[in-house]
Amino acid sequence: MTIRQSLLTLSALTLPATALAQYAPWPSPPPPPRPPVLQRPVVAEPWMAQPQPANPQQPWQSPAAASIRAPALEPIDLPPAIEQGVDMIYIDEELVPRSVHDNNGALGDMNLAAWSGAPVDLFTSVNPIYTDLRRGLVKYQQRWGDLPQVTIPSGPTLKAAMTGERVGLLRQRLGLGEGPAYDAAVAARVKEFQAVHGLKDDGIAGAGTVDALNRGAQYYEQLIFLNMERAKRLPAPEEQAKYAIVDAGDARLSLWENGRKVDEMKVIVGKAETATPMMAAYIKYASVNPYWNVPPELARNLIGPRILAQGTSYLTDREYQVLTSYADDARVLDPSTVDWQAVVDGREEVRLRRLPSPANSMGMMKFMLPNYFGIYLHDSPEKEHFTKNELWISNGCVRVEDYKRFATWLFGGYVPKGKDPKVEEEVDLPRPVPVYMTYLTVQPTANGVQFMEDHYGRDAHLMERFSAQLMAGVRGE
């Protein structure tokens, strides 16, 4: 029996909680307390490997990333055990799901060729997103997989009232009756196809729509399967009672309790050249009223020229401080003693920080998850980016749409407040909360799935490298 036959037969089945429990007896171990100084973990397993600087010539790096000097946060140079764009780096080993442990006793041999097409959620407990995607695959195959996979030649945009051979092929490709006319039925079917496949759903078959149709259903089935593999790296309900997921593919933060999504909001994640990495770590504390430490390149290229043009009042009016170093015991300097032309020229470097305020780039709170990527979540004063859906613009860290709602969930019902609104203060969570950062470019829906834009170019690379294995998995070979 092929995977498609088995999925069609078993897609409606779910195992009861009592049955799932026998497959996943692990309780979630208590996480370690936050250490006073972040120490790099001992590399005992491949998923705990520390990243090395990225190689800008690696083929999976996006064109945008390859064009800059600074290495992207991901891809990174990792052992063969880590399949970049699919696997997750677990900063804290307690966060590794059992499905990852069980796939290989030694993950050093793990790669896409080892992926199985079996619907694993029918035999063991996995993350609910996996099950939703698996069911979405079945619905996608039922709706689009059985249609004639004919090729439509390139040509002018096809739209209402047009006729001809290409319109006839379009009708055939969409499973409509024979005829030469681009009528209301064709427009409706095109619009439905566009909505599912992440295209502008205007009912007009332009070059992008024709290209998507010509890729064929198998291509999109492989994409679903690829995202099912990503979902396997997320925790099963009994492994983590409370956790958050940052999905850089959809730019969403979802909050989970006991296997159910209880809330979600938009986030701003990394742009292509500074992609938010796929990783998991504990959120252990919040920085209330955080300082903003200005990156050196911004001090040189952005703030320095403005000081030269407007004087040091540019700093004092905006509550910036100049410090002697990045050490905890750094002293505050008089801005007038700094050679700002030397800073702009790159001959000197200074540390600038902005005092806590609603205008601070960190907003009113940072959510800290100690990790060697330097990634954290934080508030943002620039709320217009959320309303405009400008969500892939950060340098890798994650800006949350509603920090108060997120903090209330993390802290169990309240938002911590600092003693002094102008002094950063760290407040420990009552209990550390895991956050899993993934990259899902297919989202499950009530009617099947919704394909998303591949902002980081990861899908294209993986499909090129492993299309044969992916197709074998889809077919159950």
Image (cartoon, grey):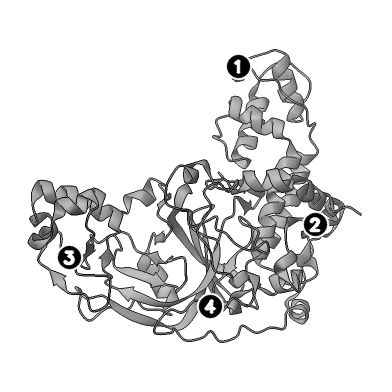
| Residue type at tag 3 | Val
Mark 4, residue position: 41
- Give the structural element (helix, strand or loop) at label 4: loop
The CA span between labels 4 and 3 is 33 Å
Q: Is residue 39 left or right of residue 308?
A: right
Q: Nearer the viewer, mark 1 or mark 4?
A: 4
1 or 3: tag closer to the N-terminus: 1
Find numbered disc 2 in the image and state the secondary structure of the residue it sits on: loop
Q: Which residue is mark 1?
A: 156
Q: Residue at x 52, y 60 (%)?
A: 277
Measure how far apart labels 1 and 3 are at the Cα level.
60 Å
Report crowding for label 1: few under 14, some 14 to 19, many 20 or more residues within 10 A (C-alpha): few
Does residue 436 show up? no
Give the SS element for disc 1.
Answer: loop
Q: Camera-side residue: 264 or 30?
A: 30
Q: Is residue 34 above or below residue 305?
A: below
Report the mark closest to the observer, 1 or 2: 2
Q: Is residue 377 left or right of residue 7?
A: left
Helix, strand, or loop for circle 3? strand
Q: Which residue is mark 3?
A: 322
Q: Are marks 4 and 3 in contact (CB under 8 Å)?
A: no
The answer to whether the residues at label 2 and label 3 have Cβ atoms under 8 Å apart is no
Q: Which three-letter amino acid code belongs to the residue tagged 1?
A: Pro
Q: Residue at x 72, y 52 (%)?
A: 225
